[in-house]
Image: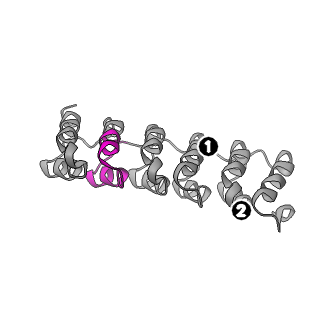
Amino acid sequence: MDLLSGLGNADRLQGINTIYKNLPAVLNASDVVSILDGTNNSRLDALAVLQPNLQTPITAASAVNLLSGLGNADRLRGINTIYTNLPAGLSAPDAVSILDGTNNSRLDALHDLEPKIATISYAMDVANLLSGMGNIDYIEGLKILSSKLPKNLSESDITLLSGPANNYAGAAQQILKNSNAS
């Protein structure tokens, strides 16, 4: 966007706020990514300004590009900012790509993103969604995903998914077995 060339960070955000009313009513994700380029520390605020004009739905790959440079709690807030633009029925691998970078905010991000996630077909996809979570968060993550867990988990799947819970493996196994029964 020529009007914003040479502007970065807060100056670019101020420029976005200035030209916002003159932007098209609907912007595709790649246009928004281009406008966001150079916002750096102001990216989350700039994304919030542009979100009402962002097309719906966007792809998971577009979401990842929009969230680029955001980590931890800022990535969580970014996910919440574009939540309404995300498609229903996200595959587990797509959800993982959106969650990547949430780090200590991963459980909260998983909780918020869960309604957009399709039923999960493979135990490994569950493990990837819960990747990096500690004991208690891992159990809470299993609870969040309980309605989306694969049906008819094998004993090896249950062992795989309860293993990272360490001292809480029994609780994880109970959640997984209850999921199998429903």
Q: Which residue shows up at 18% across the image and 47% down it?
A: 158
- Image quarter of the N terminus: bottom right
- Image quarter of the C terminus: top left
Judging depth in this view, the residue of 54 and 146 nearest the camera is: 146
Specify whether 83 is left or right of 121: right
Determine the secondary structure under disc 2. helix
Q: Amino acid at mark 2?
A: Ser
Q: Which residue shows up at 83% across the image and 68% down it?
A: 6
Other residues around mark 2 within 10 Å, as few (<14) / some (14–19) / many (≥20): few
Q: Quadrant of residue 169?
A: top left
Majority SS type along the magenta span: helix
Judging depth in this view, the residue of 168 and 146 nearest the camera is: 168
Q: Is residue 60 above or below residue 37?
A: above
Would you say residue 159 is visible in this rendering?
A: yes
Q: Which residue shows up at 78% across the image and 54% down it?
A: 13
Q: Write down the region rendered in magenta.
A: 119-142
On the image, numbered disc 1 is attached to which residue? 81
Task: Tell which circle, 1 or 2, labels the residue nearer the N-terminal end.
Answer: 2
Determine the secondary structure under disc 1. helix
Q: Amino acid at mark 1?
A: Thr
Residue 126 within the magenta-colored segment of the rendering: yes
Q: Which mark is residue 34?
A: 2
Specify whether 54 is left or right of 103: right
